[in-house]
Image (spheres, rainbow, N blue to C red):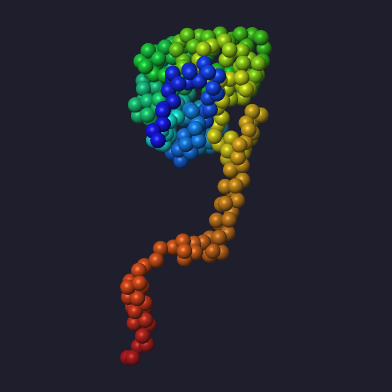
Amino acid sequence: MVQKRVTVPILRGMKKRGEKIAMLTAYDYTFALLMDQAGVDVLLVGDSLGMVVQGLDTTLPVTLDEIIYHTKPVKRAVQRAMVVADMPFLSYQVTPEEALRNAGRLMKEGGADAVKLEGGRKTAPAVRKMVSAGIPVMGHVGLEPQSSKMLGGYKVQGKSVEAVDVLLEDARILEEAGVFSLVIEAVPWQVARQISQSINIPTIGIGAGPHCDGQVLVFADMLGLFTAFQPHFVRRFAQMGSEAEEAFQSYCQAVKKGAFPSLDESYSVDDPVLKELERRKSTSHEPNRG
Ligand code: KIV
């Protein structure tokens, strides 16, 4: 059955109807295919791939080419979900013109349906430039991992009245600049609820409570694949990390014992070839009559 693709107007309609939006990060074909088939609405090729795929400590070194590389297989896998590509650190902060050029590459080369960037009002000129070129842009406020060095780590944001006012104003300015949706990360749920109620575009929460219009998690966290640490807001919907480790151990044991592969798991030649091979073997072993 041909699936109706998730688009900007569809996401807006979901907010209007109070229908929640399910978003997950995806970095490869295999998992993107499973997520799309499962009904995930939006797949984010997040710069979190720096941690999950590349084993980095921060998202800062992730490049535009790397995001493009991962966006291609994700896009190839989906029939229904919207694919959003993250704009990595310094790909949109320098000038709006550069932001437009880089967002264009994510769409033209990667096949992204939309792009996401971090930051409040300071990103509004870049957002306007991209939106005026027809590029759907998702905003991201609250904890901005690309600014973790300035923030002194990955800390909950919006805890004071002043900080809440800044967040509300940032959300309003970004909506006015044209973002079609807004990620809110690591913000008290009461604050995220107030932001969600104050703007007309869908909000997507991560560590921002249940009142956002949708939710996003890093897929490796929610599958229990990435276990180095577990943020407070992560729910593990599976324990795939321990299951995978057990499978790897069983594989090692089976190989080392010679129990894998069995003959049933091996290819076999047809009878005439087998007979010829056996005939040759028996002639080559004939006693030397000298
Ligand atoms: O890069 C990422 O995975 C993200 C999500 C945490 C929203 O930006």
Q: Quadrant of the N terminus?
A: top left
Residue 67 percent location from the top left of the image: 43, 30
Q: Quadrant of the C terminus?
A: bottom left
Is residue 62 something one can see in this rendering? Answer: no
The structure residue drawn at horizontal position 44% and vertical position 20%, both measured from the top left corner, is: 8
Q: On screen, 25 above or below 164?
A: below
- Taking depth in this image into account, of 248 and 194 the one nearest to the observer is 194
The structure residue drawn at horizontal position 61% and vertical position 12%, both measured from the top left corner, is: 194
Is residue 247 something one can see in this rendering? Answer: yes
Residue 103 percent location from the top left of the image: 39, 22
Residue placed farthest to the bottom in the image? 289
Q: On screen, 280 above or below 182?
A: below
Residue 190 percent location from the top left of the image: 65, 16
| Quadrant in which residue 147 is drawn | top right
- Taking depth in this image into account, of 222 and 46 the one nearest to the observer is 222
Q: Is residue 174 left or right of residue 194?
A: left
The structure residue drawn at horizontal position 48% and vertical position 38%, both measured from the top left corner, is: 34
| Quadrant in which residue 155 is drawn | top right
The structure residue drawn at horizontal position 36% and vertical position 15%, both measured from the top left corner, is: 133
Q: Is residue 151 left or right of residue 126?
A: right
Residue 21 percent location from the top left of the image: 53, 24
